[in-house]
Each structure stands twice: as structure tokens, then as C-alpha cells.
Image (tube, rainbow, N blue to C red):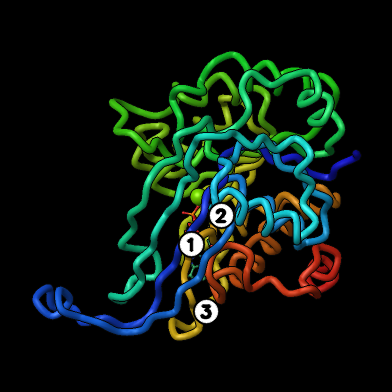
Amino acid sequence: MSLDVAVIGPVNVDLILSGDAPHQIEEIRNWFGLSDVTLNAAGSAGYPAQVFQKLGLQTGLLTVTADDALGSALRYEMAKLGIDLSRVRVVPGEISQIAIYILLFGSKKRPLTGRRSSHQPWPAPLDTADLGYLASARLIHIAGYLHYPSMWDDDIPNMLRDAKQRGQMTSLDPQFPLWPLEGRWLPGIERLLPYVDVLLVDQDEAQNITDLESLDEAGRLLRQAGPQIVVVKRGEQGALIYHADQRIEQPAQRVPENEIADTIGAGDAFDGGFLAALLRGRSVAEAAQIGTAVAAISVRGHGAATALRAEDTIDRLIERFS
Ligand SMILES: Nc1ncnc2c1ncn2[C@@H]1O[C@H](COP(=O)(O)OP(=O)(O)O)[C@@H](O)[C@H]1O
Ligand SMILES: [Mg+2]
């Protein structure tokens, strides 16, 4: 199978409750009411995989899923979109991860609770068939790497080094540690960065990875660690992009508050649009506009990819922005 993008990382189910609940704790205790309930295939790898696929890129997922009801739902939803699951592992006797967003009190992202999966987030070590699969993709996107200190071994750095030797494009959205981590987070991703073309983080992550307050200094340090392009996403303030000696300030599109369903997965939507545009040979500045446009569509629906329609392909978006 020849892929445009292979995404490696964890998947989980997001259960998103949205609506209006009383704000007083005494009232909440006795509250009974209806809300919107959305069950999404999700996760640091699951969300960008869906965005890439909906944008019209043939996407393959390298992940592990449980042999439970949520695992079946995950595989069903991803397969329905046309994502290639031929290397997805199904492990018996384990449980799927679920994140439960309770958007009943005004916030579009919190409170959040849930449970972790009991299995590995992606196949490790990668076997010969996995490596051949990855070698067939134009872009290898690693997602959620900082979530799992237990996975910070030689496997992914070696795979990325080989990918770069073959001339493949590589990208990383490391997210954040799920367990408290002493000191700066840089050691968690340092060994990957020499082989990463595009690093995408949000503002908090940039600061915590580098232990630097200034985003410009953080951007510079991260660029020196390897990536040609460093993207720092800043929610409704947009994004900063560091590339060669350029500093691009990309404003977000303004989306009226009452049109925002949630901002869950907005960063993954940005990643998908940005990387898809680069794969189509667009400039970094154009990719920033397209990433922003995809993120602005994303916040209008639940999770990263629900609001993307059939006409929101990367080729149509490129036409609109050039
Ligand atoms: N409230 C919002 N209104 C418009 N765009 C938004 C909003 N929140 C996020 N975005 C878009 O999503 C992108 C990524 O958002 P951010 O929340 O910073 O990433 P992450 O999800 O990785 O933390 C931003 O650069 C912006 O383009
Ligand atoms: Mg993010």
C-alpha cells in the first residue's frame, strides 16, 4: 500500500458532553438534565489521521487498540473514513482509553476526566512489516510521544533516522507528559529532533519543553535541535512559525463564541492542514494559513474532524488561499 501519510501514536475514544448544567455544586449534585453526547474516535494519532484522510490524503495508522467495545468503535469509525488500518494491532484482554469532556459549565475544553488504556500506545518494537509500511509513506507523523516515558527508547529515533536517509518528510506533535515530569521536557524528544522536519507544539508545550518563557527563544532553541520548521500554536491568538530566519505571525480566524462547539483537537486540525499543504509543495506561510483555516473549521464541530465536510479537501483549500 502506498500512503501519503503514516501516523504513529495512540488512539482513544472521546466522550464529549456539552450543554448547560447549573454552576452551583449543591445544584449539580441533584441535577438531572439532557446534554449533547458525542462519542468520537480520537487520540493524539487518531485525530490527525482523521484530519489528513478527510483532507483527501491516503492515511495509514500505526497504533494499538483493545479488543473491547470501545476498540471496535475506534476501528469502525477510522475504517469508515478510509484510513488504512492494516498495521493496527488488536490486543485481547486489555481496555481502551477514554477521555470524558464535561463541557457543561462554559469551557470548551474542560473539565476532563477519563481512564488510561492498559496496553502499549503503538506497536513496539516496530517489526519489519511496520518499517516497510512506514517507508511507503511520503510523510511520517509522530503524535503524542511525550505522553509515554516508557516508549522513549531507540525504536522511534532509529526509524526516523532511516526515514530521513531515504528522503522522507517527518513531523512530530509530541503533546505533553501524562505523568508529572520533573524539569524541562526536552530530554523526552531530544533524540528525535535531528530527524524531524516539522515540530508542532502549543505555547505551554514550547515553554515546558525548553523551560523558556519567551516563545522566540524557545522557537530558536527548538530550531537549533534539528527541525527546519517549528510551529507554536496559541489558541485563539493563532500561531508563531519559525523557519530559516523567518518568524511568521499567523493570526487565528475569528470564530464567534456561539459557533464554537469545542476546541478539542484544534491543534491536531492545524497540524493536518499545515502538513498537508507542505506535502502539496506550498510555502510555509501558505501552510500556516491553511492550518489555521482547518483549525477554524474544526472548532465548529466536536473533536478535530467532525466539522470537516466533503468539500474541505486540501486541494480546494489551496485554491481558496492562492
Ligand atoms: N477559540 C478559537 N478560535 C479560533 N481558532 C482557534 C481557537 N482555538 C484554537 N484555534 C485554532 O487552533 C489552532 C491550534 O490551537 P491550540 O489550542 O493552540 O492547539 P492545541 O490543541 O495543540 O493546544 C490555533 O493556532 C488556532 O488557529
Ligand atoms: Mg496539541
- Give residue 170's position: percent from left, percent from top: 72, 34
Q: Residues within 10 Å of mark 3 (few under 14, many from 20)?
A: few
Return the residue at label 2. 42
Q: Secondary structure at mark 3?
A: loop
Based on the displayed image, in which of its 4 quarters is residue 133 positioned? top right
Q: Ligand 1 within 8 A of label 3's CB?
A: yes
Amino acid marked by disc 3: Val
* The N terminus sits in image quarter: top right
Q: Is residue 312 above or below residue 187?
A: below
Q: Answer yes or no: do the residues labelled 1 and 3 have beta carbons within 8 Å?
A: no
Amino acid marked by disc 1: Ile
Q: Residues within 10 Å of mark 2 (few under 14, many from 20)?
A: many
Based on the displayed image, in which of its 4 quarters is residue 18 positioned? bottom left
If you read the primary sequence from the N terminus, does the residue marked by circle 3 or circle 2 appear first?
A: 2
Q: Residues within 10 Å of mark 1 (few under 14, many from 20)?
A: many
In the image, is 268 to the left or to the right of 167? Answer: left
| Residue 206 visible here | no
For the residues labelled 1 and 2, the Cα–Cα distance comes to 10 Å
Q: Secondary structure at mark 2?
A: strand
If you read the primary sequence from the N terminus, does the residue marked by circle 1 or circle 2 appear first?
A: 2
Residue 255: mark in rendering = 3
Q: Secondary structure at mark 1?
A: loop
Amino acid marked by disc 2: Ala
Q: Ligand 1 within 8 A of label 1's CB?
A: yes
- Give residue 264's position: percent from left, percent from top: 48, 62
- Give residue 129's position: percent from left, percent from top: 81, 24
| Of the two numbered discs 1 and 3 in the rendering, the one whose residue sits closer to the viewer | 1
If you read the primary sequence from the N terminus, does the residue marked by circle 1 or circle 3 appear first?
A: 3
